[in-house]
Image: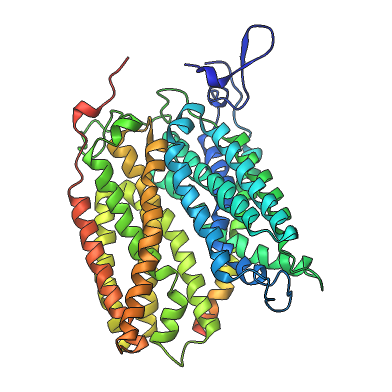
């Protein structure tokens, strides 16, 4: 195996945010719709 | 070992590795495996859009008439084939590309999925502009469906190899993304169609172009970031349990050999029964709650109910798959089938008693187990057949999903129609259907019970 570089932690954090922010937005939009069931 | 297909001629008589080859995507020392879940999610959050395709149905039926359907506009039944074709192509692509995706690795597979899924939207946009339905069948149905199949399987098997200590959780993370993708796509599609809508356009074609480009970029980012672990890689500080677990093999079964084992067909049936039971009610949830609680549940509240089911469908994928790491895959499916059967049996009673809270609670648990069934099966396959060909085997198993996609809605719709035609009240018409679901779940329980470890004669021999 050739010599590698450790994963850049800030890059990894940004990558996680890149997928989690849209997912959180989708969950939020769905929750606001789901709340109507309890009104 | 390199294969010819993974090597590109450089014109000098020698060969070089393609950036998209399996070998070029092997992780180097220092690479964190926690980069892999977002790479998988970048793909699954896109292809999960498929569950939200129905938001386009009404606008697509008014492409000519704009405010209302014109005689030359597409009928909803015509449009319904776009999604059906996509799901069929998903199953076929996952099944038939199994060997190929194991050979070329996840990077090339995921990039191919990005090209197919993204271009599927663009071809569909052209179809809307020209008002040619066959272009939508070709675009979203065929190309998009192939993108769905390739994009679904490849990240999951890669994650399982990176997380031998948490196979269920790893698969659950990716497949949760597939459930969550619809939650992003539905409001995004509605927003974009509203933005592009004019007096002469319903805004669907423009929306398809934007979404096609967005999904292509996001899935390509996922494919560029994905890495496969080196051969015999293990997480630091982790050693496989020395205590023999008879349901987790350390051997590997070849993708073609897996089809010769009863275990493959038993797990196929396990997935089929679990999905059939869930998918049947998922499509009818809105109508079902309105008919069960006539007068007290409005259309808006029913839409909220569907949203709640989507949330539990998504959450169940991560929670149940992670739970399977602790209690085992077989026990997890036992829970799905037994608890599911009890809840399906009780739902009509909850409906008849007018108890909305119990009715809703039963359904959200049922839907969490529906999602959990999808997310737990890759780890189940890895436990039984080993990880060497788990992606391809998983792909072939997804034909159970396609079959359940037909069986579930047919069971619910036709039995209900038969009951109503024979004078049963609409509110009571689902009772028979739900009791048939109980029988299906008990059949699934028996199939799961029969799953044992694979006979050693099917194991691959060490070179």
For image coordinates 47% across by 52% down, the residue present is: B88
In this view, B360 is above or below B77: below
Residue B460, given in percent of the width and then of the height, sits at: 29, 24
- In this rendering, would B408 be left or right of B10? left
Residue B322 image point, x, y percent: 38, 50
B178 or B432: which is nearer to us? B432
Quadrant in the picture for the C terminus of chain B? top left
Q: Residue furthest top?
A: B13
Front-lying residue, A3 or B248? B248
Does residue B37 appear left or right of residue B405 in this picture?
right
Left or right relative to B130: residue B227: left
User: Relative to the observer, which residue lies in front, B326 or B283?
Assistant: B283
Image location of residue B301, percent across then percent down: 52, 82
Residue B351 in sight from this viewpoint: no
Residue at the image position 77 percent from the left and 67 percent from the top:
B195
Q: Residue furthest front?
A: B72
Q: Nearer the viewer, residue B134 or B462?
A: B134
User: Does residue B44 show up?
Assistant: yes
In the rendered image, which quarter is residue B394 located in?
Answer: top left
Q: Seen from this angle, which residue lies furthest bottom?
A: B295
- Decide: is B95 above or below B256: below
Identified at 32% across, 50% down, the residue is B324
Residue B56, x across and y down, in percent: 63, 66
Give the mark count: 0
């Amino acid at each position: 195996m050739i010599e590698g570089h450790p994963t850049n932690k800030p890059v990894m954090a940004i990558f996680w945010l890149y997928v989690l922010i849209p997912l959180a937005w989708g969950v939020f939009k769905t929750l606001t719709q789901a709340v109507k069931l309890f009104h | 070992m390199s294969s010819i297909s993974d090597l590109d001629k450089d014109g000098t008589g020698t060969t070089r590795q393609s950036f998209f080859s399996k070998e070029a995507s092997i992780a180097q020392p220092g690479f964190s495996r926690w980069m892999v879940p977002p790479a998988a999610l970048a793909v699954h959050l896109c292809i999960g859009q498929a569950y939200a395709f129905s938001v386009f149905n009404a606008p697509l039926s008014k492409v000519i008439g704009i405010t209302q359907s014109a005689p030359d506009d597409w009928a909803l039944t015509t449009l319904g084939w776009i999604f059906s074709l996509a799901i069929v192509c998903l199953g076929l692509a996952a099944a038939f590309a199994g060997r190929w995706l194991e050979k070329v690795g996840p990077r090339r597979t995921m990039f191919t999925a990005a090209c197919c899924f993204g271009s599927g939207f663009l071809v569909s946009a052209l179809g809307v502009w020209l008002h040619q339905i066959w272009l939508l069948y070709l675009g979203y149905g065929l190309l998009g469906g192939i993108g769905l199949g390739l994009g679904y399987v490849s990240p999951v098997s890669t994650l399982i190899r990176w997380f031998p200590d948490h196979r269920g959780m790893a698969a659950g993370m990716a497949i949760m993304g597939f459930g969550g993708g619809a939650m992003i796509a539905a409001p995004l599609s509605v927003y974009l169609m509203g933005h592009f809508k004019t007096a002469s356009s319903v805004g669907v074609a423009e929306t398809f172009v934007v979404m096609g480009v967005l999904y292509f970029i996001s899935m390509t980012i996922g494919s560029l970031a994905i890495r496969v672990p080196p051969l015999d890689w293990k997480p630091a500080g982790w050693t496989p349990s020395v205590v023999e677990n008879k349901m987790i093999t350390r051997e590997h079964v070849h993708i073609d050999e897996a089809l010769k084992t009863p275990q493959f067909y038993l797990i196929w049936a396990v997935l089929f029964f679990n999905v059939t039971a869930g998918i049947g009610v998922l499509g009818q949830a809105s109508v079902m709650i309105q008919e069960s609680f006539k007068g007290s549940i409005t259309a808006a509240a029913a839409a909220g109910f569907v949203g709640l089911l989507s949330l539990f469908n998504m959450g169940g994928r991560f929670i149940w798959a992670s739970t399977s790491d602790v209690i085992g895959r077989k026990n997890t499916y036992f829970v799905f089938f037994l608890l599911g059967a009890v809840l399906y049996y009780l739902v009509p009673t909850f409906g008849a008693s007018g108890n909305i809270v119990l009715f809703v609670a039963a359904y959200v648990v049922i839907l969490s187990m529906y999602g959990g069934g999808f997310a737990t099966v890759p780890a189940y396959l890895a436990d039984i057949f080993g990880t060497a060909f788990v992606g391809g085997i998983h792909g072939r198993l997804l034909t159970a999903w396609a079959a359940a996609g037909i069986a579930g809605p047919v069971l619910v719709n036709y039995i209900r129609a038969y009951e109503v035609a024979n004078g049963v009240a609409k509110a009571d018409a689902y009772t028979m259907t739900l009791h048939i679901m109980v029988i299906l779940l008990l059949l699934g329980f028996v199939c799961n019970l029969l799953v044992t470890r694979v006979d050693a004669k099917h194991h691959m021999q060490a070179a």
